């Protein structure tokens, strides 16, 4: 029996593929600090479970395909804080930000179309673009330049005749880079010139540091009809396992089209939407407290990183990731060493090799991503283990 | 900006498109008996919410991509009752049966491939097949013959050089037709001859009446590697809003491929899987009681239906649907009459016109689907309203 061409082109997950080696090490008693996946340790706000536990309907029936109206309204109020005015006709609730991305690409891509994505990029973009018959075309960056990408020169060098969309993730995974408003305007002009959709993945929106204010590509009125905003409860509200995402559009043709797919898959779970409604109703002061914690963690991670000779990393401005160039030839080989051979007092640490975040062959081989999703003491220890590990690896 | 060709080929939902007219009628005070959607009124087993309410982890983090292992194990035990032996490597937990279908088609279809589906069919198959670049090719049936389809002659008349799969839903939506073991064998031989995948949508598996025993295409060992079983908590356990489905395969190549997509979308909600685990652990006696209720409802619906002159309907053997040929020219026109003009003591009823369940233009225009998901008294009254409505429509 046949498997589709597109599924054969998909990558396996570079984030999850080293898990078996880590599990084997842990089964032998080694303690591993996991900086390899963006699964926050911050408490899910109690209002989420409280709202769900108060649910007592007799039958848990289908919800409406666009989403629960109370959740839609809470989302509308949340975006109003950014002067982004929405109606229920602009807001589709999805099974995580993942489904929002998947639906967006399915609605806009034909077989053979290209999607511009600055690399290194969140690896699952590749899966979703490929699932819709498209190809990822990378916008080139360098670690030495802090993975800057939103310049006219870089964008024009990357665009192809078949390009139909550009993905902007800000604050960025895996680099932590934050787009400035000027950069957003550059992307907006570029998208208008080439008639592109803009996928604005802003699930880390408020996690911007050093006193900067959160922004959104949705704030630029002249591109409102081509910006598709992806949002989620996973990161802002530390509820990755709730799987509630949002796809915002202000384009009636797009909306009619995406609703065909949304009706096909029926709806998002009723209980998770009840919980998510309470999350979107939380005041910004809640998010401020979470941001402060991530900023402190970033500072610890960066401070410890700068003690390691030969690393290249510009201090990132947001999200909870850093991409780092290491003084090793192969980050994958080094990771296997860290998991299988290295230990210090019975402990080691885990990161994600960054090559899987690149479409360009050969790029990122000596780079890694870390997610600073542990408490500050654990991050300090994990970065110390990284330093000791590099020393041991070089002396092995 | 471009919308994809495939999304433009998708149908809107024929099940949901008349909702605005019904809502308008209800706002004017008319009571409407809804037989138009398969949203059961049976109580969700309390163990579902109880298990969720007992959850108290600090952070609701990502689950494993294949699904929670306890749920996988409960599913394995459930299928063992059918002598279908599975391991965790055969069981993928999905966001409803919908995602199971969507993933299956994405893994097996290339642009331009065909999928055989007996018509009338569950309309969202069209959405999922189209989303993967494929086309639905109908296997022709007639209401006079009880929508029989699984004969060698009908299958061979339908198959095309590009056919890659056949969808079998048993018990059937929208017809209530139940495949016999002999029919399953016919489909199995046909699939082997043409090297097809078999999508076995068995979400109504136990809802078979008249003393027949539930079966599964998964019970045929000689086609195990080509049968993809779709299962769900929605119907068997009256938990449509939980959105937990299952995709079972016994084909390592397929499994590796579908796991790429599953990892891309990360996971299914943690809480819903905790609830679903308890559902799959329920004894068969629970399901027997639900089946008895649906069988009684079918008998009521059929008895009342037979009082209406000119209808064509063979008594269906399972699920909770019937497709019925009415003595009207256009079921859509008649539905609008029922919602906007007809009433008896301030009441009317709603069904789904069946034309949207056909790929063949012009077919099903005088047919409807009803879902007997209300209590017996309400079904009796709804069918009385259907009879009175037809009389009024003919005399208008």
Image: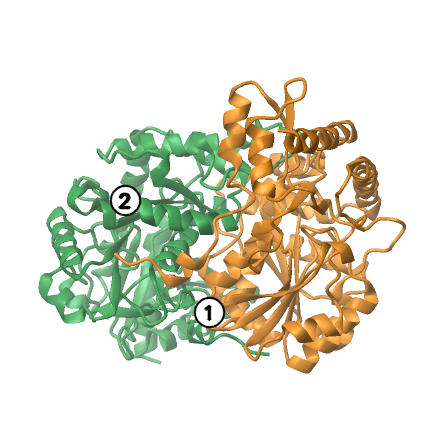
Chain colours: A orange, B green
- For this orientation, the residue located farthest to the front is A395
- Quadrant for the C terminus of chain A, please: top right
Residue A10 percent location from the top left of the image: 46, 56
| In this picture, residue B328 sits left or right of residue A354 | left
Q: Quadrant of residue B369?
A: bottom left
Residue A40 percent location from the top left of the image: 68, 38
Q: Relative to B238, is A67 above or below? A: below
- For this orientation, the residue located farthest to the right is A211
Q: Is residue A24 visible?
A: yes
Residue A269 percent location from the top left of the image: 53, 47
Q: Quadrant of residue B224?
A: top left
| In this picture, residue B44 sits left or right of residue A76 | left
Q: Quadrant of residue B124?
A: bottom left
Q: Nearer the viewer, mark 1 or mark 2?
A: 2
Q: Is residue A65 visible?
A: no
Q: Relative to A140, is A315 above or below? A: above
Residue B205: which numbered mark, if any?
2
Q: Counting residues from the N terminus, which is met first, the one under dot 1 or under dot 2?
A: 1
Residue under mark 2: which chain is it in? B
Q: Relative to B27, is A244 above or below? A: above
Residue receiving disc 1: B17
Disc 2 crowd, CA 10 A, few/some/many (<14, 14-19, 20+): many
Residue under mark 1: which chain is it in? B
Residue B278 percent location from the top left of the image: 43, 30
């Amino acid at each position: 029996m046949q498997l589709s061409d597109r599924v054969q082109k998909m990558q396996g997950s570079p984030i999850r593929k080293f898990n078996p080696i880590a599990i084997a090490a842990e089964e032998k008693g080694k303690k591993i600090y996991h900086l390899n996946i963006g699964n926050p340790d911050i408490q899910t706000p109690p209002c989420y479970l409280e709202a769900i536990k108060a649910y007592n309907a007799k039958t848990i029936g289908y919800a409406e395909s666009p989403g629960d109206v109370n959740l839609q309204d809470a989302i509308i109020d949340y975006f109003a804080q950014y002067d982004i005015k929405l109606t229920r006709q602009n807001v589709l609730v999805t099974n995580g930000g993942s489904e929002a991305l998947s639906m967006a690409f399915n609605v806009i891509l034909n077989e053979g179309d290209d999607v511009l994505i600055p690399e290194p990029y969140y690896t699952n973009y590749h899966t979703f673009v490929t699932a819709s018959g498209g190809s990822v075309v990378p916008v080139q960056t360098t670690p030495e330049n802090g993975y800057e990408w939103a310049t006219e020169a870089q964008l024009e060098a990357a665009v192809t005749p078949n390009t139909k969309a550009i993905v902007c993730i800000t604050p960025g995974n895996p680099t932590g880079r934050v787009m400035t408003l000027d950069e957003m305007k550059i992307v907006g002009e570029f998208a208008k010139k080439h008639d592109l959709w803009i996928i604005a993945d802003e699930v880390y929106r408020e996690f911007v540091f050093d006193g900067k204010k959160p922004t959104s590509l949705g704030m630029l009125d002249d591109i409102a009809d081509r910006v598709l905003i992806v949002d989620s409860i996973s990161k802002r509200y530390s509820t990755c396992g709730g799987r509630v995402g949002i796809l915002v559009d202000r384009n009636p043709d797009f909306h009619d089209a995406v609703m065909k797919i949304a009706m096909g898959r029926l709806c998002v779970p009723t209980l998770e939407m009840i919980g998510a409604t309470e999350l979107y109703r939380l005041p910004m002061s809640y998010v401020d407290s979470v941001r402060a914690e991530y900023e402190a963690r970033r500072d610890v991670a960066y401070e410890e990183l700068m003690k390691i000779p030969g690393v290249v990393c510009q201090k990132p401005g947001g999200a909870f990731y850093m991409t780092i160039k290491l003084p090793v030839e192969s980050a994958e080989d080094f990771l296997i060493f860290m998991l299988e051979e290295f230990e210090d007092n019975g402990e080691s640490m885990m990161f994600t090799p960054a090559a899987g975040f690149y479409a360009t062959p050969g790029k990122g081989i000596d780079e890694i991503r870390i997610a600073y999703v542990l408490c500050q003491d654990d991050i300090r220890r994990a970065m110390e283990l990284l330093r000791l590990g590099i020393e041991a690896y070089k002396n092995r």
